[in-house]
Amino acid sequence: MASNDSDSQMKIVHGDAGYILEDVPHFADYIPNLPTYPNPLRSNPAYSVVKQYFVHMDDTVPQKVVVHKDSPRGVHFRRAGPRQKVYFKSDEVHACIVTCGGLCPGLNTVIREIVCGLSYMYGVNKVLGIDGGYRGFYSKNTITLTPKVVNDIHKRGGTILGTSRGGHDTGKIVDSIQDRGINQVYIIGGDGTQRGATVIYEEVRRRGLKVAIAGIPKTIDNDIPVIDKSFGFDTAVEEAQRAINAAHVEAESIENGIGVVKLMGRYSGFIAMYATLASRDVDCCLIPESPFYLEGKGGLFEFIEKRLKENGHMVIVIAEGAGQDLLTESMQAMDQKDASGNKLLQDVGLWISHKIKDHFARKDKMPINLKYIENQ
C-alpha cells in the first residue's frame, strides 16, 4: 500500500482495487522507534478468555456497506477497539478529560466510563478533569477523577466538569498539558471542539510530545457516518415526541388545525425522522437530506390543503436545517457563527409557519389555525 502523510489531519492510504483508508494521525508518525507494551487486558481474566476480543492492526470499516460487484472497494476507516500492544505503561499514564460546547444528554456517563475504563481495565490511577471547557486548561482548577468520585454522576444532567464555548488558546493549552505531565487528553465536544482538538494535536506534534489526543464526538444529531448511534440521540428523540404529541393535541382540537414542530439536528434529519416514525401522528416530515418546495404541483402547500380536506388537521415536523436554501434572509445573516465557529442556522420553523399562514390567508374558503412549537 502507498500512503500520503502530507496532511497531519488525515493520513490517506491507497490499496488495491480502489481501496482508500482515511486514517487517523498517531504520535508514532513523528516519534520514531516508540516502545510498545502488552495490553493490560491480556492479563485481565474478564477479557483474556474472550476469543477475538482484540482488534487487528489492519482492521478497517467500509464507509459504504452496499456496493456493486464491479465497484471499487472505496473509502475505509480505521476500526476502533483494543489492540494487543499499547504505547503507554499503566503507571505512566496521566490522563485528563475536558467537556466543551453545549450540553448533551449522557455527558456525565461518558466521563464516568472513561474514568472507570481507565482504572478498572487498564490500571490507570491518575485522571484529571479540566474545569470549564478549553479555557479551564489555563484559567481554572482541575478536579481529580476516580471511580469513587464519578460513581453516581450518570444520574445527573449536564457535566460535572462544567463547559464553555470558545476560550481556545492553543499555546496556553499545550503549555498546560506539558507542565502538568499529561500524556492522554480526552476531548468531548462537537464540531468546533473537534476542530480545536485538531489544532491541539498539530501543536503537540510540532513540539514532538508523546501525547495522545482523543476526540469524543458530542452530538445528539446522530450525524456521524459508520457508527451505530451517537450518545444523547435517544433522549433527543424521546423529548421530540413530547413536542409532537402536544402539536397533535392542538391540531386535532380545532377545525383545520396545523401543528408545526421544529426539531434540532442541524444539517441532518435523524431526530426529526426517528421522532416521526416513533410518533405515528406526523403527516409531513421535512429534513435537510430531502429538498422540498412550497408552491405548485407536488409542493408543500398542495399537500397541506389535500391533507386538511381528508383529515381536518395535520402535523408537520421540520428539522432545523431543512429548507435553509428557501429562506430569503441576507447573506450577512447567513454567515453569522457562534463562539465555537458553527454557522448559525436561520429559524426555518418560524419562517415556514408565516409562509403557510400567508398562503391560506389568500384562500378565503379554507381558514386555518396554526400552532408553532419549537423544541430546541
Image: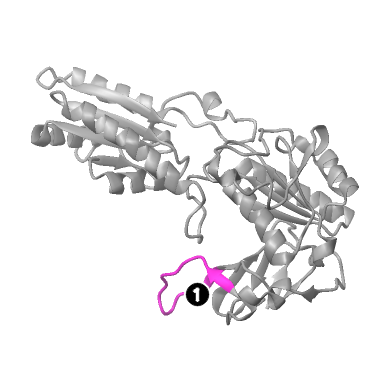
- On the rendered structure, is 171 left or right of 345? right
The residue shown at (20%, 21%) is: 369
The residue shown at (56%, 34%) is: 343
The residue shown at (31%, 21%) is: 354
Q: Could you say which is closer to the camera, residue 42 or residue 68?
A: 42
Instruction: Indicate whether 373 appears above or below 148.
Output: above
> Circle 1 is placed at which residue position?
72
Q: Please tell me in which quadrant of the rendered image residue 193 appears.
A: top right
Expressed as whole percent of the image width and height from the top left, the position of residue 225 reads 50, 57
Expressed as whole percent of the image width and height from the top left, the position of residue 370 reads 24, 23
Please say whether residue 294 is visible from this viewpoint: no
The stretch of residues the image draws in magenta is 60-75
Q: Could you say which is closer to the camera, residue 25 or residue 52?
A: 52
- On the rendered structure, is 112 left or right of 261? right
Q: In terms of secondary structure, what is the magenta stretch mainly?
A: loop
Q: Tag 1's secondary structure?
A: loop
- On the rendered structure, is 18 left or right of 71? right
Residue 66 falls within the magenta-colored stretch? yes
Residue farthest along the front direction in this orientation: 148
Expressed as whole percent of the image width and height from the top left, the position of residue 118 reads 70, 60
Residue 284 falls within the magenta-colored stretch? no
Expressed as whole percent of the image width and height from the top left, the position of residue 120 reads 69, 63
